[in-house]
Amino acid sequence: MTKLVVSVLISRNNKNKMQKEEAFVELIKQNEGLIFKITTMYTDHYDDQQDLYQDIVYQLWKSFDSFRSESKISTWMYRIALNTALTRIRKKKRFGNSVSIDQVILKQTENYNQEFEERLKLVYAHVRKLNVVEKGLIFLLLEGKKYEEIAEITGLSPTNVGTKISRIKQKLKQQIVKK
């Protein structure tokens, strides 16, 4: 177990509210990339992305005391983040669709690479066209998760995960080659 996980478990069970909050904030800081990637994958507008980020952090806080250490803390976070994103999508569908105006703009860094940014935008554009389950599976794969961990997060069997991912890869490959 990492120091963070031990700290989280100790702080979570400790009655000191301040230590619990500090451990949670540290957990969020160390995993904000995970949350950012999910919000980017499941939203089209910057404002929606910010709202989803807040919803995910709120749901993580609400569930913080219920983490049982039966899985990695990152697996627990992925599951809550993905479920929060999917719940938000279902609610949004009930109230109608909006038209996307914003595009995800990658922050320029010292290592800015125009060609890489264009390829990344193309991949994201095609991934956004996938259904919600396919998006989640491909996201977890791109995060370097093994089929077993993806299965644990999604509730699918590892064999089913492998089959679905293979089909998604083929689908994306066909779509990208067409352009």
Image (cartoon, rainbow, N blue to C red):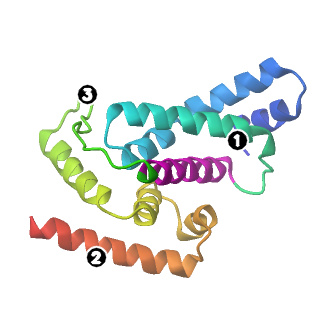
Label 2 to label 1, Cα distance in Å?
A: 37 Å
Badge 2 or badge 1: first in the primary sequence: 1
Identity, as a three-letter code, of the amino acid under mark 1: Thr
Element at label 1: loop
Number of numbered labels in the structure image: 3
Magenta span dominant secondary structure: helix
Identity, as a three-letter code, of the amino acid under mark 3: Thr
Label 1 environment density (alpha carbons within 10 Å; few <14, some 14–19, many ≥20): few
Cβ atoms under marks 3 and 1 closer than 8 Å: no
Q: Which residues are magenta?
A: 72-92
The one nearer the camera, 17 or 33, is: 17
Q: Furthest residue to the front?
A: 95
Residue in the picture at 46% in, 59% down: 136
Between marks 3 and 1 in the image, the one whose residue lies nearer the viewer: 3
Residue 120, percent from left and from top? 23, 49
Residue 103, percent from left and from top? 23, 39
Does 87 lie within the magenta span? yes
Identity, as a three-letter code, of the amino acid under mark 2: Gln
For residue 134, side relative to residue 27 (left or right) = left
Label 2 to label 3, Cα distance in Å?
A: 32 Å
For residue 76, side relative to residue 43 (left or right) = right
- The residue pinned by badge 1 equals 2
Residue in the picture at 40% in, 49% down: 42
Badge 2 or badge 3: first in the primary sequence: 3
- The residue pinned by badge 2 equals 170
Q: Relative to 158, is 13 above or below?
A: above
- The residue pinned by badge 3 equals 109
Residue 5, percent from left and from top? 73, 40
